Image (cartoon, grey):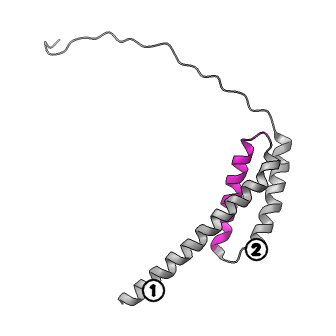
């Protein structure tokens, strides 16, 4: 062995374990939550005017379901979460439209 290297003994600490609480089985609530999501999303999509709103509203609904699922009362909290997420999604769509319009006007003035 080379004189520059020194052999070190490897020491490992004990394994760290975490308690993870079990999530109760909610198969019946999933179907109810999905039905509620579909019903409320359909109402939002009927009001949607721009084609880009469809995708953003669907994504907002899926995000709201995921957040609601992590609570003790997903069916109760989902409508409020969906409303908040949909509002943010529609604002984002409006901002994107404004950016596209400004970009187009800038591109046309430079040509």
Q: Position of residue 38 (x, y in %)?
A: 80, 59
The residue positioned 38% from the left and 11% from the top of the image is: 11
Q: Is residue 60 above or below residue 15?
A: below
Q: Main secondary structure of the magenta part?
A: helix
Q: In the drawing, what numbered circle is on residue 105?
A: 1
Mark 2 surroundings within 10 Å by alpha-carbon count, few (fewer than 14), some (14 through 19), many (20 or more): few
Q: Is residue 78 above or below residue 28?
A: below
Q: Is residue 34 above or below residue 110?
A: above
Q: Position of residue 83 (x, y in %)?
A: 73, 60
Query: Which part of the image, by quadrant, shows the C terminus?
Result: bottom left
Q: In the drawing, what numbered circle is on residue 87?
A: none
SS at badge 1: helix
The foreground one among 45 and 3 is 45
Q: Position of residue 73 (x, y in %)?
A: 80, 43
Residue beneath label 2, please?
47
What span is colored magenta in the figure?
52-72
The residue positioned 78% from the left and 49% from the top of the image is: 77
The residue positioned 60% from the left and 22% from the top of the image is: 18
């Amino acid at each position: 062995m080379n004189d520059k290297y020194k052999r070190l003994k490897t020491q490992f600490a004990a394994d760290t374990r975490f308690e993870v609480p079990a999530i109760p089985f909610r198969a019946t609530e999933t179907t109810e939550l999905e039905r509620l999501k579909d019903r409320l999303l359909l109402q939002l999509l009927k009001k949607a005017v721009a084609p880009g709103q469809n995708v953003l509203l669907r994504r907002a609904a899926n995000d709201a379901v995921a957040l609601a699922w992590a609570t003790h009362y997903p069916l109760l909290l989902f409508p409020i979460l969906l409303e908040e997420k949909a509002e943010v999604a529609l604002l984002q769509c409006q901002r994107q439209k404004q950016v596209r319009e400004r970009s187009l006007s800038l591109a046309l003035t430079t040509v």
